[in-house]
Image (cartoon, rainbow, N blue to C red):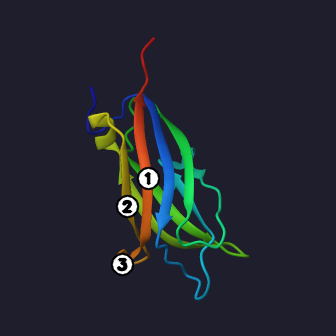
């Protein structure tokens, strides 16, 4: 059935629900946050940008098709602050979704956003993740 090296075929649903207590690089004011995320470079996604908040509510769902035999079990999230020129990275979250597939039940959890050094929290990101197995014809 499911090995630790290969994903079964199906669809991974990822909802970026919200974030809280975002720390930013800006000295004054609040962030204009958005989230970029990917399983591999083929499936990069991005939320909408929200203005002037350190506690954004995104409620955006994305889908990632997983093919039989793919072996990447991690989703990489980067939380960014949009500036007039470019964006500043607030922090990152990496989620291993192998257990979600194996246990066949969705998760809805808060994840610590780590900054450049990884030592202190730059806020939290709430994610809802589920997997739907592809039914054979």
**Looking at the picture, how far across and down is residue 41, in whole percent?**
54, 49
Q: Is residue 131 above or below residue 113?
A: above
Residue at screen point 50% across, 63% down: 78
119 relative position to 17: left or right: left
Residue ID for mark 2:
111
75 relative position to 98: left or right: right
**Looking at the picture, how far across and down is residue 59, in whole percent?**
55, 51
* Rendering quarter of residue 61: top right
7 relative position to 63: left or right: left
Of badges 3 and 1, the one in the foreground is 1
Q: Earlier in the sequence, mark 2 or mark 3?
A: 2
Q: Earlier in the sequence, mark 2 or mark 1?
A: 2
**Which mark, by number, is residue 45?**
none
Q: Earlier in the sequence, mark 3 or mark 1?
A: 3
Q: Residues within 10 Å of mark 3 (few under 14, many from 20)?
A: few
Q: CA distance from mark 2 to mark 3?
A: 13 Å
Q: Are marks 2 and 3 in contact (CB under 8 Å)?
A: no
Q: Is residue 52 above or below residue 57?
A: below
**Residue sitting nearer the eye, 1 or 104:** 104
| Secondary element at tag 2 | strand
7 relative position to 80: left or right: left
* Rendering quarter of residue 115: bottom left
Q: Are marks 2 and 1 in contact (CB under 8 Å)?
A: yes
Q: Residues within 10 Å of mark 2 (few under 14, many from 20)?
A: some
Residue at screen point 53% across, 78% down: 24
Q: CA distance from mark 3 to mark 1?
A: 20 Å
Q: CA distance from mark 2 to mark 1?
A: 8 Å
**Residue sitting nearer the eye, 96 or 5:** 96
**Which mark, by number, is residue 127?**
1
Residue ID for mark 3:
120
**Looking at the picture, how far across and down is residue 77, in whole percent?**
48, 58
């Amino acid at each position: 059935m499911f090995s630790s090296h290969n994903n079964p075929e199906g669809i991974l649903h990822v909802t970026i629900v919200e974030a809280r207590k975002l720390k930013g690089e800006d000295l004054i004011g609040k962030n204009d946050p958005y989230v970029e995320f990917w399983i591999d470079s083929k499936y990069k996604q991005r939320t909408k940008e929200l203005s002037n908040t350190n506690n954004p509510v995104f409620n955006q769902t994305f889908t990632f098709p997983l093919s039989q035999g793919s072996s990447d079990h991690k989703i990489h999230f980067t939380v960014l602050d949009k500036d007039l020129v470019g964006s500043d990275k607030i922090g990152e979250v990496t989620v291993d979704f192998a257990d979600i597939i194996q246990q066949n039940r969705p998760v809805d959890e808060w994840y610590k956003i780590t900054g450049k050094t990884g030592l202190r929290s730059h806020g939290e990101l709430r994610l809802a993740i589920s997997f739907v197995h592809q039914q054979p014809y």
